[in-house]
Image (cartoon, rainbow, N blue to C red):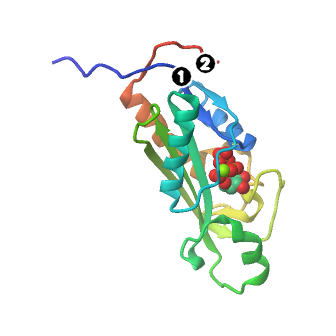
Amino acid sequence: MAAAAARVLPKAVTFVTGNAKKLEEVRAILGSSIPFQSLKLDLPELQGEPEDISKEKARMAASQVNGPVLVEDTCLCFNALKGLPGPYIKWFLEKTGHEDKSAFAMCIFSLALGPGEEPITFVGKTAGKIVPARGPADFGWDPVFQPDGFDQTYAEMPKSVKNQISHRGKALALVKEHFAAANYKVQNNESA
Ligand SMILES: O=c1[nH]c(=O)c2ncn([C@@H]3O[C@H](COP(=O)(O)OP(=O)(O)OP(=O)(O)O)[C@@H](O)[C@H]3O)c2[nH]1
Ligand SMILES: [Mg+2]
């Protein structure tokens, strides 16, 4: 019996983000494994469960792009605060006496093949702890997150090492597996 026909996409997948540092990492991690173009859009910052936020971002992006999109939502979550995500990090570090500085970085990619299509999610998590800042401060909380098994923070390690072990690297490994299995065909390959 012949294999199921590959799904034809009207154009290459667009990775939508307003964050240049994310785009830099996604490019480095994906290389030429998945042909994609990118678009800088400031999507609304939604509230809710990380997976729902990521899916909703994908729905909004797919309707704006009118085609297949990939988006991601990232958070740094503290085990001491039952996984409460990111924005309270400064307060957490300076004002709280929590003994438990363990945390995890989580990245949830969502792929929507077009407007109105249910997004598929890919989750990557890296466990570590929150430490006083070390290393270059050009990407969010990289200086204060030290992954388990390493004596450097994300900011201190070479990019190639971060990308191999990071929340983003792990989630993108799943995205790559999905693309390899799905074998999408792009109708009008005008991606760069
Ligand atoms: O130190 C970091 N290392 C990382 O690997 C990383 N990934 C994301 N972030 C930051 O975490 C917040 C998430 O927000 P976020 O997912 O909504 O992203 P964003 O709003 O910047 O872009 P986007 O939503 O347009 O894609 C933003 O402040 C990002 O700068 C990171 N910080
Ligand atoms: Mg955002």
SS at circle 1 = loop
Is residue 161 visible from the viewing direction of this image?
Answer: no
SS at circle 2 = loop
Instruction: Please report the residue visible at 59 percent of the width from the left and 78 percent of the height from the top.
Output: 81
Specify few, some or many for label 1: CA neighbours under 10 Å numbering under 14, 14-19, or 20 or more: many
Instruction: Please report the residue visible at 77 percent of the width from the left and 83 percent of the height from the top.
Output: 95
Q: Residue 36 appears in which quarter of the rendering?
A: top right
- Residue 82 position within the rendered picture, expressed as x and y whole percent measured from the top left: 54, 76
Q: Count of labels shown?
A: 2
Pick whichever of labels 1 and 2 is earlier in the sequence: 1
- Residue 106 position within the rendered picture, expressed as x and y whole percent measured from the top left: 56, 57
Q: CA distance from mark 1 to mark 2?
A: 6 Å
Instruction: Please report the residue visible at 15 percent of the width from the left and 18 percent of the height from the top.
Output: 1
Q: Which quadrant is the C terminus positioned in?
A: top right
Depth check: give the residue in front, 130 or 149.
Answer: 130
Q: Residue 136 appears in which quarter of the rendering?
A: bottom right
Depth check: give the residue in front, 134 or 27.
Answer: 27
User: Which dot marks residue 12?
Assistant: 1
Depth check: give the residue in front, 56 or 191.
Answer: 56
Q: Is residue 189 above or below residue 26?
A: above
Under mark 2, the amino acid is Ser
The reply to whether callout 1 and callout 2 are in contact (CB within 8 Å) is yes
Specify few, some or many for label 2: CA neighbours under 10 Å numbering under 14, 14-19, or 20 or more: few
Under mark 1, the amino acid is Ala
Q: Pointer 2: what residue?
A: 191
Instruction: Please report the residue visible at 60 percent of the width from the left and 18 percent of the height from the top.
Output: 191
Q: Is residue 157 above or below residue 96?
A: above
